[in-house]
Amino acid sequence: MNSQDITYAQLARRIDHSLLKPELTEADIIAGCELAQRYHVASVCVKPCYVPVAAHHLVGSDVAVGTVVSFPHGSSTTATKVFEARQALADGARELDMVANYGELLSGHSQAVEADIRAVAEVAHSGGAILKVILENAYLSDEQKVLGCRLAEAAGADFVKTSTGYAPSGATVADIRLMLATVSPHVQVKAAHGVRTLDALLAMIDAGATRVGATATAAMLDEFARRQAGSPASEPLASEPLAAAVDLKHHRQMQDQHWEADLMAENESTPQSKAELVARITREWDALQAAIAGLSEEQLTAPGDGGWSIKDNLAHIAAWEQYMLAAVLQGQTAAQALGVAPETLQGLDDNGINDILYRRNRDLPVPAVLDAARLSHEQVMQTLARTPFEDLPKQFKPDRPEPVIEWVIGNTYDHYREHRLYIERLK
């Protein structure tokens, strides 16, 4: 498979979303896991101390939990590496990125390097995990890279990997080709360090990498979606004109004109129990799914009177659910929840946020939007399942008088119903 025929979903499954920077907090890890779920990447790679956090937040998802062993220098003793690997598996990791002892490799101690890798490979495989061995190519000659690959394969590694991200240089196309040519077909190659653009990502795939470590996951996949849709690359959110505001205004006018009677007629009191809340969310979600069932891609993408397609409505619902999860239920700031600089939000009301979300999602392909809507709903239900009901009537923030439950209602069953009514009129 190469960059000419790879699909959006296939590209996403080549990415290990990296969350290894030493300054990352637990909130950053949670946000990174949510991003990984939204984009359906292959895995997250988190610091060992946050494996339990990632495992908790990714339970039931299609994103694997990965972590590192003897990172970033590879100089721990074999016994320490084995302990780290066992602990990571016990905490929920299913992919281990181990740093080979490249000091020993540079010293010519091949048997020690192989034995070190084999010990960790045995632990990984006994726990149903895969092992990727990082060689840290920046410090190796081509001959040493070849030797490192051969030792890793002999020891039972599933992948050989270029870099940790903490050396002077990272993945190169030449190194990926060299490593691929060295190992047998059952051993795969992972590129890491410096892959920050879509073109760089595609170049690594064309060279033969089947996994790529990345921090710019969202930017690269969004750019791929824009290219697939034939749209030009967008400018940064803060500087892009609010061109979609007209469509949003028409959208709101249609709501006011057509939905007021429906919404007033179906107005309900606040749920008095978690079971009642969940039942209402489930009822309206099922109704929304029934409204879009069997629709063709042409029907899903055809713009309505207000400029929004059914796909746009679904992306809007998912985006606001993600915002609610991050800002309301997990305590992130609005800027963190939206992934923008704080100054971008200055002076913006909900309509301004709508514009940011619309522009971010408008070029996503239909399958990605449908997956995002489903995943966001599942995350909401999982979060509510572990949230005590007595916490929901509490005030959102000291400067925001609304209780949390109003945000939940407004971004789940009320929102589903609102957009379902519009969708049914578009059909």
Image (cartoon, rainbow, N blue to C red):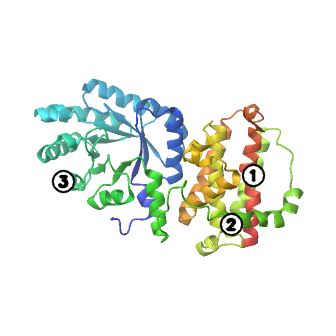
Q: Amino acid at mark 2?
A: Val
297 on left or right of 14: right
At label 2, counting other C-alpha atoms closer than 10 Å, the crowd grade (few under 14, some 14-19, many 20 or more) is: few
Residue at label 2?
246
Q: Quadrant of residue 421?
A: bottom right
Where residue 113 appears, x then y in whole percent?
18, 34
Q: Is residue 201 above or below residue 119?
A: below
Instruction: Tell us which disc is closer to us: 1 or 2.
Output: 2
Q: Amino acid at mark 1?
A: Tyr
Quadrant containing the N terminus in the rendered view: bottom left
Circle 2 sits in a helix, a strand or a loop, which is it? helix
Q: Quadrant of residue 206?
A: bottom left
At label 3, counting other C-alpha atoms closer than 10 Å, the crowd grade (few under 14, some 14-19, many 20 or more) is: some
What whole-number distance in Å separates the C-alpha atoms at marks 3 and 1? 54 Å
Residue 109 in sight here: no
293 on left or right of 17: right
**Earlier along the polypeptide chain: callout 2 or callout 3?**
3
234 on left or right of 145: right
Mark sitting on residue 178? 3
Total marks shown come to 3
Where residue 31 appears, x then y in whole percent?
53, 41
Where residue 35 appears, x then y in whole percent?
52, 47
At label 1, counting other C-alpha atoms closer than 10 Å, the crowd grade (few under 14, some 14-19, many 20 or more) is: many
Residue at label 1?
413
Q: Amino acid at mark 3?
A: Leu
Circle 1 sits in a helix, a strand or a loop, which is it? helix
Residue shown at 33% from the left, 57% from the top: 200
Where residue 412 appears, x then y in whole percent?
72, 50
Residue 123 in sight here: yes
Residue shown at 43% from the left, 30% from the top: 90
**Earlier along the polypeptide chain: callout 1 or callout 2?**
2
Circle 3 sits in a helix, a strand or a loop, which is it? helix
